[in-house]
Amino acid sequence: MRLFAGLVPPADAVSELSRVVDRLHTLPGSEGLRWTGRPGWHFTLAFMGEVDESLLPDLRERLRRAAHRSEAFPLRLHGGGHFGRRALWVGAAGGIDAMRMLAERADAAARRAGVAMEEHRRYQAHLTIARARADVDLVPYVNELHAFEGAPWAVGELLLIRSNLPGGGEPGAQPRYEVVGNWPLGSGG
């Protein structure tokens, strides 16, 4: 199964972001972007890719321990950016150091459980809101996101999420995400 460790913003934060994204849809060229679905908005902490089910018991235990060693932290959606000319994202502010540490712990948990992880890179907090099939000038979208400041919330759990990719080449089909494990942060975990 295709898995990642992540965080999901609460409904209020998703509503705030939805209003901003709706405005982005009115910018010239927005029809050339594939907008991610609101039910799938998340921050990926550690992407694991295809994971053999035999690794799940150890992976779950290691993620539980990673959550236990990480305290809850404040976070808010903030600004935006892009990766090249193909991905548009919203950033985060607040407990970024704590978020980065949780990402490192989730990555280490997966590696120690035997998950073949990609090359390790420094964590960049981002929530992808659109992708492009071809090069697109994303600067106008980033400029629109620049002043965006969402309300803070407390991140209190680490999630293990299964990504179910759409099949059949259906235009506009979105991945479906399913939480397959969750652990409270801190000593409550």
Image (cartoon, rainbow, N blue to C red):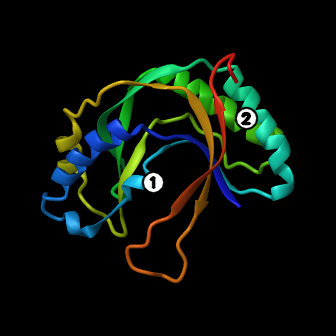
Q: Residues within 10 Å of mark 1 (few under 14, many from 20)?
A: some
Q: Is residue 157 visible?
A: yes
Q: In the displayed structure, would residue 39 be above or below residue 127?
A: below
Tell me which label, 2 or 1, sits earlier in the chain. Answer: 1
Q: Quadrant of residue 152?
A: top left
Q: In the displayed structure, would residue 117 be above or below residue 1?
A: above
**For residue 40, which numbered disc appears in the image?**
1
Q: Is residue 114 visible?
A: no
Residues at marks 2 and 1, CA–CA distance in whole angstroms:
21 Å
Task: Provide the residue designation for mark 2.
Answer: 63
Residue positioned 29% across, 43% down in the render: 15
Say what amino acid the circle numbered 2 marks.
Leu
Indicate the quadrant containing the N terminus: top left, top right, bottom left or bottom right.
bottom right
Q: Percent from the top left, x then y, of residue 98?
A: 54, 21
Q: Percent from the top left, x then y, of residue 71?
A: 60, 17
Residue positioned 52% across, 83% down in the render: 168
Say what amino acid the circle numbered 1 marks.
Gly
Q: Nearer the viewer, residue 126 or 182?
A: 182
